[in-house]
Amino acid sequence: VAAYLDNHYAFSVPIERLCRISFMGQTKLKAAFKECFGCTLYDYILQKRIGQAQHLLMGTELSIAEIAQAVESFAKQFQRVTGLLPREYRKLNRVGG
């Protein structure tokens, strides 16, 4: 499940698909995932998305709109996790700028 999420974090991933991959029901999958990774499935995906967004903000000239398309629910989630708007984060962490 984690490997699948690592490769599909930018997309909406239905819990039913994760259940089929893991051969578990929702309750068991959620509990097992939290036990293994110390976070919920949602938080795991969110961490992946924010990490990718940070990478794109620091290392590319992509617009925030382009990054938002690449990383679902980008701006709102980014601010929730980092405490900064994407524009603020880029300004503070720009390489060579």
Image (tube, grey):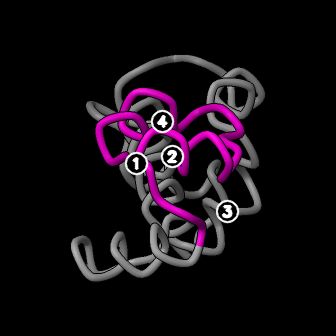
Tag nearer the camera, 1 or 3: 1
The amino acid type found where label 4 is placed reads Leu
Task: Please report the residue visible at 48 percent of the width from the left and 36 percent of the height from the top.
Answer: 57
Location of residue 67 in the rendering, given as x and y in whole percent from the top left corner: 64, 28
Q: Secondary structure at mark 3?
A: helix
Decide: few, some or many residues near mark 1? Use Cα within 10 Å; few <14, some 14-19, many ≥20: some
First in sequence: mark 2 or mark 1?
1
Relative to residue 90, is residue 64 depicted above or below?
Answer: above
| Residue bearing the label numbered 2 | 49
Disc 2 versus disc 1: distance between alpha carbons?
22 Å
First in sequence: mark 2 or mark 4?
2
Tag nearer the camera, 1 or 4: 1
**Residue 57: image tag:** 4
**Chief secondary structure of the magenta span?**
helix
The amino acid type found where label 1 is placed reads Ser
Total numbered badges shown on the rendered structure: 4
Stretch in magenta:
1-26
The amino acid type found where label 3 is placed reads Gln
| Residue bearing the label numbered 3 | 77
In the visual, does 44 lie left or right of 62? Answer: left
